[in-house]
Amino acid sequence: MLIGDKIKSVRELKNYTQEYIAGQLGITQAGYSKIEKGKTSVSLDKLQQLALIMELPIENIINFDSQHYLIQSRIVEKGTVANSHNSFELVTRLYEDKIALLEKLLGKTDRELQFYKEKCAMR
C-alpha cells in the first residue's frame, strides 16, 4: 500500500474531507488529491502536519494497513483480544475519534436547530 493510499484510508476513517485536510495544510483540494493519488511526493514536513491534523503519530499513518485494520475491526466487533497491541490501539483511537467527531457534529446540528426554532418563533 502506497503512502497516499494510507493517508486516504486514515482520512476517511476519521471522516475528514479532502477539502478540510487541504485547508488545514494550506493547499488546494486538487493539490491534496494529488498527494492521495501518489502524483505528488509527501515531504516529511507535510507528513508531520498530516499527523497533527489527524491527531495520530506519524508511525500510525506510515504503518497503516487496511487489511490489518479490517481484521482488527472484526476482532474488536467480536470482542476477542487483538494480536497486535499497537494495531488495537490504532483501531480504538480511530473509533474514538470518529465518535467524538460525530458527537461534535450532532451538537452543532442541535444548536443550529435550536437557533432556527427560535428564529421561526419570533415571526
Image (cartoon, rainbow, N blue to C red):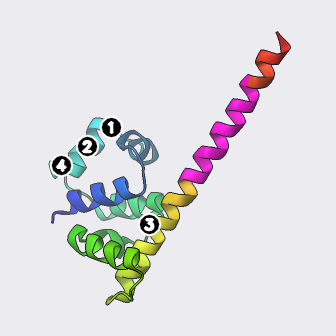
Q: Which residue is mark 2?
A: 33
SS class of the residue under badge 4?
helix
Q: Are marks 1 and 4 in contact (CB under 8 Å)?
A: no
Q: Are marks 2 and 4 in contact (CB under 8 Å)?
A: yes
Mark earlier in primary sequence (2, 3): 2
Label number found at residue 94: 3
- Report the Cα–Cα distance between label 1 and label 4: 12 Å
Q: Which residue is mark 1?
A: 29
- Report the Cα–Cα distance between label 3 and label 4: 22 Å
SS class of the residue under badge 1?
helix
Say which of marks 2 and 3 sits in front. 3
Q: Are marks 3 and 4 in contact (CB under 8 Å)?
A: no
- Report the Cα–Cα distance between label 2 and label 3: 22 Å
Label number found at residue 103: none
**Which quadrant would the C terminus be assigned to in this image?**
top right
Q: Is residue 116 above or below residue 31?
A: above
Kind of residue sitting beneath label 1: Gln
Q: Residue at x 68, y 32 (%)?
A: 112
Q: Is residue 107 magenta?
A: yes
Kind of residue sitting beneath label 2: Ser
Q: Which residue is mark 4?
A: 37
Q: Residue at x 42, y 59 (%)?
A: 49
Segment tinted magenta in the rendering: 102-116
Say which of marks 3 and 4 sits in front. 3
- Among the 4 quarters of the image, the one containing residue 47: bottom left
Q: Is residue 63 visible?
A: no
SS class of the residue under badge 2?
helix
Mark earlier in primary sequence (1, 3): 1
